[in-house]
Amino acid sequence: MEGPMRFYRLLAACVCCSAFSASVFAQNVSREIAGWYNDGWNAESHNSYLGNHYLLSEINPFWFDLGTQENLILADGTISVRSYAFNPQNVLDAHNNGDLVIPSIADHALGQINAILDDPVSRENLIHNIVSVVVSHDFDGFDLNFERGLASGRAQFTAFIDDLATALHGYGKRLSVTIQPATSLTEENYNLFDYAALGQTAVDRIKIMAYDHNFDAGVDIPGPIAPLTWIRQVLDYATVVRGMPASKIHLGLHNYAWTWRQRPNGKYRLLTPHDTFAGVVAKCGTSEFLWNEEAKESWVSYLYTGVNQISYVGDARTVEQRISLVDEYDLAGIAFWVLGREDSGLYQRLCAYFDGTCTPTPAYGNLALGKPATASSRYSTYYSAAKAVDGNLWEGWLANPLRTTATLTVDLEAPANLSEVRIHWGDYDWSINYDIQVSTDGSTWNTILHYPNNLDGGWDAVGIEGATGRFVRIVCLGPKSDNWSYEIYELEIYGRLQ
């Protein structure tokens, strides 16, 4: 009754998606709509994706870094995963929704990427490591976010992008590059990215971060995050002045808020990290914000805990003013920073803009999580059936040892189209033979799989594509692996509600 063993048996074919087998466009709109995941709020970001996946075509979770997690400034081509954020189930969820998974990688030291590209061995290591990670994890590509690169390495970076894109294309994968906004050659020359040259490389998408313009006036001066006129200047410069193909551009839009708090001297101080739409509403007590007509952006001034605060917000109204730019400039699409921080109303505005054809479709995921569960017996009240659907893989339901057979039943609370059942057995207590059954009413059961000779426990991933029902149960038929009891740490049931 300890933690689950680190092995499993696959009982049916798993889903395997390559880069371009997933949808190139969101399922209901004519442009690509991507969203970054904030690594500190990965679950929050993914929940937002699941709720709005029918509009999104791509997710960009911040899951990787240059260097190791112990040495993030290492510059030898090593890359590492942010294990506290990375969740392989997110990949399966997105692929089952027909969407692309293109994780982002960040640099952490000024000139780190320059040092890597200046050394041929490190440069080759970086290409090899990125391609290996993308292929081994079945990602659809990679997004490079190297904001600390030095302008002195622009030519080397451009050549690197061409080589990396070519290598990824050999496996049917994409490459995207996230770059800082610029409205002039002077601004562009401060950064690593050569707009004109990058546009002519084999890179698939270029994400322009058209936000945080307010910082140009000083981070502690309240103001619009991304005035609409400035965004137009950014796009005019990229596409007209520098010739960057519009068909490669994802326009990065903000859907978060920045909040400034007044200090005793009357000046303001920026509060970090960026605020959420819901957070601002909770503090100011309303979602009816003021409107900056010049910037086309929402804002609000309010008293919070006795102190004046000002928030500028990328709410639905603000985003709505910017959506048409994708058609005006014929861009590939939009990329939102960041999923999970936003005003949920912006998705209705997106639907309305794209001809109102957006029909929410149920998300693919673990339908059993947190749902009502019952069992034919239990060892004690501590080892209840509910523990098998609580997301904790370290302990779960334990049957009464005195019973020869036992059942664990989950009510999905609605009819569902099912595709896979995952059973995380206890370390020592599993059933050598078991059935998986489904029911529409909880009374009449259909056995969709009988599995004999389950000799090694661990966890079983069982494909049940085509099965439908509201109730799913596991029937432990025996014999018991250790002649004592049956234990299931977690029962996961994947599919879509009807």
Image (cartoon, rainbow, N blue to C red):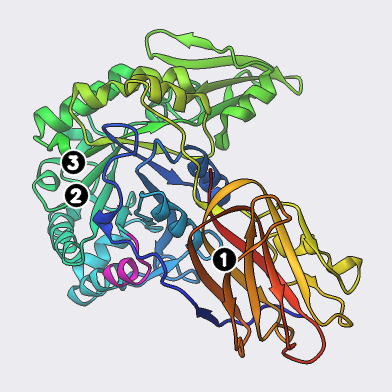
Q: From the viewer's perspective, is residue 242 above or below residue 14?
A: above
CA separation in Å, label 3 and label 2: 6 Å
Q: From the viewer's perspective, is residue 495 above or below residue 288?
A: below
Numbered range of the magenta stretch = 131-139
Residue neighbourhood size for the residue with mark 2, other residues' Cα within 10 Å, grouped as few (<14), some (14–19), many (≥20): some
- The amino acid at mark 1 is Val
CA separation in Å, label 2 and label 1: 36 Å
Q: Please give the name of the residue rendered at 64% of the width and 74% of the height, measured from the top-left corner.
A: 435
Q: Nearer the viewer, residue 450 or 347?
A: 450
Q: Is residue 438 left or right of residue 151?
A: right
Residues at marks 3 and 2 touching, judged by CB atoms closer than 8 Å:
yes
Q: Is residue 58 left or right of residue 329?
A: right
Residue 63 location (% of width, % of height): 44, 59
- Name the residue tied to disc 1: 421
Q: Is residue 375 left or right of residue 264?
A: right
- Name the residue tied to disc 3: 248
**Magenta-span inclusion, residue 221:** no
Task: Locate residue 166: give its quadrant.
Answer: bottom left
Residue 488 location (% of width, % of height): 71, 73
Q: Report the magenta stretch's main SS.
A: helix
Q: Nearer the viewer, residue 84 or 299?
A: 84
